[in-house]
Image: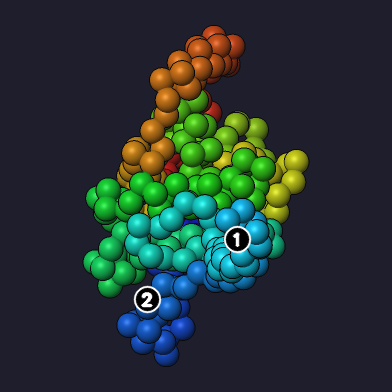
């Protein structure tokens, strides 16, 4: 794999998020706990009383929140992520998602600056669903972890096929069919259009292997219903029967999950 390949993706990943060097770590991580914005609305209602033959007026204070309907179990605000996604600034949203995952994984991950695959189990089901639902909501169901998991299962858990399918690998201009990893950030797609591969975002770094992404897919937050599992099995069967006789592994330049 070339030097310009996705080895450089470590600069944006869950592995090594970049923060200003003059920012104290305690201030940095506490700043991730943003408070959700709320709006208070006072309503004046009138009710007719038959006993006193008059109207009784009273006020009701109504509070609305700008955050997602699901409530975080860790009191973390998703306002900044929602803001980036609403503005279709998917690169900033991708960066914010990585920071949130580090916070959600616990104190050890925050001190370390990246998430171990074994720490995914400590992330609450509700919070992972919030992340996923926000991505799906603002991408017409084209982005999100659950979208990626569905694609991963359709290729029978083959990471090479998966990376090609979601556009994390590129086909090389060679006589033999060969693939290599895309360079971050220039070769990734940060816009939502017809050419953007389904499941392209959010990105997950695989520099330490694919176990982090695998454990995210296996989290209870993304359990697939039995009907959907049966659907995927049928699709896999049809896909396998119509696929090329040449095994994909024979057509791949190099199996390397180093980004």
Front position in the image: 150 or 81:
81
Front position in the image: 56 or 42:
56
Instruction: Please tell me whether mark 2 sits on a helix, a strand or a loop.
Output: helix
The quadrant holding residue 51 is: bottom right
Considering every residue shown, the one lying at the far top of the view is: 241
**Residue on which the image places disc 2:** 29
- The colour scheme of the drawn protein is rainbow
Considering every residue shown, the one lying at the far right of the view is: 194
Label 2 Cα crowd, 10 Å radius (few <14 / some 14-19 / many 20+): some
The quadrant holding residue 80 is: bottom right
**Residue on which the image places disc 1:** 52
Q: Going 67% across and 43% down the picture, which residue do you hit?
A: 140
* In the depicted structure, whether residue 27 falls above or below residue 9: below
Q: From where the camera sits, is residue 131 visible?
A: yes
Q: From where the camera sits, is residue 252 visible?
A: no
CA–CA distance in space, label 1 to label 2? 59 Å
The location of residue 187, given as percent across then percent down, is 64, 54
Front position in the image: 231 or 178:
231
The location of residue 144, given as percent across then percent down, is 53, 45
Q: Going 36% across and 47% down the picture, which residue do you hit?
A: 125
Front position in the image: 174 or 128:
128
* In the depicted structure, whether residue 102 falls above or below residue 25: above
* In the depicted structure, whether residue 241 falls above or below residue 197: above
Q: Going 75% across and 41% down the picture, which residue do you hit?
A: 194
For marks 1 and 2 on the same chain, the one whose residue lies earlier in the sequence:
2
């Amino acid at each position: 794999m070339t030097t310009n390949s996705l080895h450089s993706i470590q600069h944006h990943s869950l592995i090594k998020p970049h923060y200003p060097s003059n920012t104290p770590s305690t201030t940095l991580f506490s700043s991730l706990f943003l408070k959700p914005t709320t709006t208070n609305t006072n309503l004046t209602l009138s009710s007719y009383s038959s006993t006193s033959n008059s109207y009784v007026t009273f006020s009701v204070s109504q509070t609305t929140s700008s955050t997602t309907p699901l409530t975080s179990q860790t009191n973390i605000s998703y306002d900044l992520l929602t803001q980036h996604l609403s503005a279709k600034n998917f690169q900033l949203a991708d960066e914010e998602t990585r920071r949130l995952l580090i916070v959600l994984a616990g104190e050890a991950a925050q001190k370390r600056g990246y998430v171990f695959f074994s720490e995914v189990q400590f992330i609450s089901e509700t919070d992972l669903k919030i992340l996923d639902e926000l991505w799906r909501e603002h991408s017409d169901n084209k982005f999100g972890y659950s979208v990626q998991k569905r694609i991963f299962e359709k290729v029978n858990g083959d990471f090479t096929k998966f990376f090609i399918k979601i556009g994390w690998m590129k086909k090389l201009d060679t006589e033999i069919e060969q693939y290599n990893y895309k360079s971050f950030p220039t070769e990734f797609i940060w816009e939502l259009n017809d050419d953007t591969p389904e499941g392209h975002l959010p990105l997950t770094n695989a520099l330490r292997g694919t176990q982090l992404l695998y454990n995210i897919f296996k989290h209870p937050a993304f359990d697939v219903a039995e009907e959907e599992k049966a659907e995927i099995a049928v699709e896999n069967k049809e896909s396998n029967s119509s696929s090329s006789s040449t095994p994909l592994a024979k057509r791949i330049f190099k199996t390397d999950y180093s980004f």
